[in-house]
Amino acid sequence: MSSAAEQGPGSGFELLRDPEVLRILAHPTRMRIYSAAVQEALSAKDIADRLEQPLARISYHVRTLADAGLLRAVRQTRRRGAVETHYRALATLDISDEVIAEAGPEAYAFLARAVVREMAEDTLDAIDRGASAAPDFTLARAHFRTTAKGRERLFEELVAIYDRLRDLEAELREEADAAGGETAETNLTLCFYEGEWLAGIRNSPTILLTTPEGEANRMPVQIPPPEVAPRGG
């Protein structure tokens, strides 16, 4: 295969316009495979080892994604007498406004549920493996009551933060690749949505904050939930 095939994924995610392709991607395991293939070229064996799942199951999902045009083969390598095909994702999940508008709200909500499910599972798995014991583990949540203008300001701030993080991700990945030594896989999640703080109706919500020193023995901070008008009243 040509070296041109090694180029990274594009953007816009045009295939979202096809409901059948969207249904294929929204499967939890396939979403994980796709997300991994956005970052680097991987074989079914690489992914099976990473996700700790049977190779036959992962191979099936990889073929399904490739047949749908979501993964593209970029190179082949030999391992123990077998030929392994390595795949990259067709595009990042940075979806253009145009594609979202054409896909429609139901299709986009379907994809959003799959992404949120993946983020939640990743976070819980990391905590189960001891991530919350790390000095720099941070879990935070903020709720705002705003005017329309205030909401616009919040969104603009989030976009600016995301743009900085995207540039930093590329810079740190290049730095890690050049280091040639031990590296750490680190996740940071951003979410912005309209809605009441419904988690506070039955239980007081909790925000877990780190200190500047990253103290490992910090305690959750209990805060009162916002007032919510009775339903049906």
Image (tube, rainbow, N blue to C red):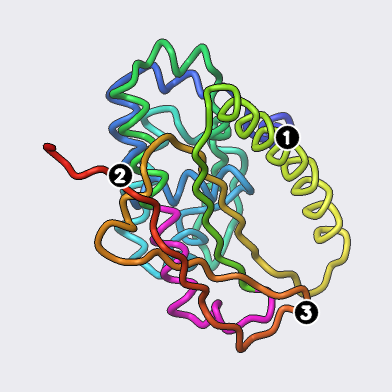
Quadrant including the C terminus: top left
Quadrant of the image occupied by residue 209? bottom right
Q: Which residue is mark 1?
A: 160
Q: CA distance from mark 3 to mark 2?
A: 40 Å
Q: Which mark is residue 27?
A: 2
The first of marks 1 and 3 along the sequence is: 1
| Left or right, 6 with reference to 207 | right
- Which kind of residue does numbered mark 1 sit on? Ala
Q: CA distance from mark 1 to mark 3?
A: 26 Å
The first of marks 3 and 2 along the sequence is: 2
Q: Which mark is residue 213?
A: 3
Tell me which residue sits at (61%, 38%) in the image.
74
Q: Nearer the viewer, residue 81 or 107?
A: 107
Q: Estimate the x, y position of residue 154 in percent, counting from the top left.
A: 62, 34
| Left or right, 59 with reference to 192 | left
Q: CA distance from mark 2 to mark 1?
A: 30 Å
Q: Estimate the x, y position of residue 99 in percent, counting from the top left.
A: 48, 15
| Left or right, 218 with reference to 207 | right
Q: Which region is colored magenta? A: 118-136
Provide the secondary structure element on which disc 1 rests.
helix
Provide the secondary structure element on which disc 3 rests.
loop
The first of marks 2 and 1 along the sequence is: 2
- Which kind of residue does numbered mark 2 sit on? His
Q: Could you classify mark 3 by the number of other residues whose Cα lies within 10 Å: few (under 14), some (14-19), or many (20 or more)?
A: few
Residue found at the very far bottom of the displayed protein:
217
